[in-house]
Image (cartoon, helix red, strand yellow):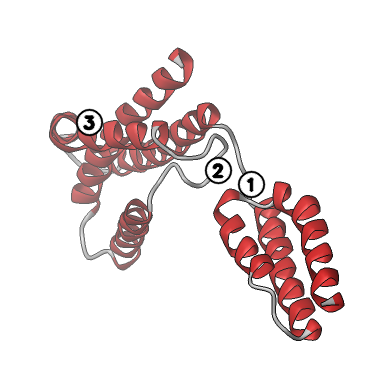
Amino acid sequence: MKLMLTESGVSAILFLLIIPKIDPAFQDCYLAGVCLLPINAHLFVSKISFLCQLKFRKMHLNDLTPRVSKHYLFIVAALVWTFAGSMLLFRGLMFNATLPSHRGIKLMAGVIGGLLFFRLLFNRISSKHVLRIVNLPVSRPCIFSFFNLRSYLMMFTMITLGITLRKTEVISAEYLSLMYVTMGIPLLMSSVRFYLTFFRS
């Protein structure tokens, strides 16, 4: 009986000291360990120690995660989209400058293709990303959460494909120029949506 009172007292102390500092998603796990008292005191201490280790490990990971408010996440996303679009457009213009003839016509074709690409695809994609940031469940999300996993995989694939095509010279500079301009313009236009959302919110 004395052992049970001691354990109950320790449980109450741990409850008062630790439970207010635990993430809401972790409180149920902690309460289960406190309420389900083992018969053996050593098992009880081990269980509480294990739960505390999980708690502090989770707190440590949260402290290391770079976070910004959702408001500033819009400007982070805008800068990333601007950088990607500018790099592609710059490379496209550089390739276009080396073409022997019809540079103006080919540049115009790339611009028209980029505008159509934005209208048919990137306008909807950027809108979904803005809405996703608005609906994030936390007020200070990870700084890299302006993309979901699918978007990161798509970005990685596009970058890898672009580098591979440029290094292997499978596609001539003429078509690379067209492709880079066509992709750079909708990315730059999509970044405007993030800038506008940032300044209006």
Relative height, residue 165 to residue 20 (above, below): below
Mark 2 and mark 3: span between their CA atoms?
Answer: 23 Å
Q: Which residue is under mark 2?
A: 143
Looking at the image, can residue 16 be seen?
yes
Instruction: Indicate whether 124 appears above or below 67.
Output: above
Which of the pair 3/114 is nearer the observer?
A: 3
From the viewer's perspective, is 79 left or right of 32?
left
Residue visible at 73% across and 69% down? 53
Secondary structure found at label 3: helix
User: Do the residues bearing badges 1 and 2 touch, measured as CB atoms within 8 Å?
Assistant: yes
Residue beneath the point at 30% across and 41% down: 92
Name the residue type under label 2.
Answer: Ile
Q: How crowded is mark 1: few (under 14 residues within 10 Å), some or many (20 or more)?
A: few
Q: Mark 1 points at which residue?
A: 66
Disc 3: CA contacts within 10 A as few (<14), some (14-19) or many (>=20): some
Residue nearest the observer in this picture, 185 or 34 = 34
Q: Where is residue 175 in the image (x, y as percent from the top left)?
A: 18, 49
Q: Name the residue under label 3.
A: 123
The image shows residue 22, relative to residue 97, as above or below, that is below
Tell me if 120 is positioned left or right of 136 in this view: left
Q: Which of marks 2 and 3 is nearer the N terminus?
A: 3
Residue at the spot 86% in from the left edge and 70% down from the top edge: 6
- Mark in the foreground, 3 or 1: 1
Element type at mark 1: loop
User: Taking 33 as reference, is 157 left or right?
Assistant: left
Sequence-wise, which precedes: disc 1 or disc 2?
Answer: 1
Residue 178, image x, y percentages: 20, 42
Q: Which of 33 and 191 is in front in this view?
A: 33
Cβ–Cβ under 8 Å for marks 3 and 1? no
Q: Residue furthest front?
A: 1
On the image, the x and y values in percent for residue 191 come to 37, 29
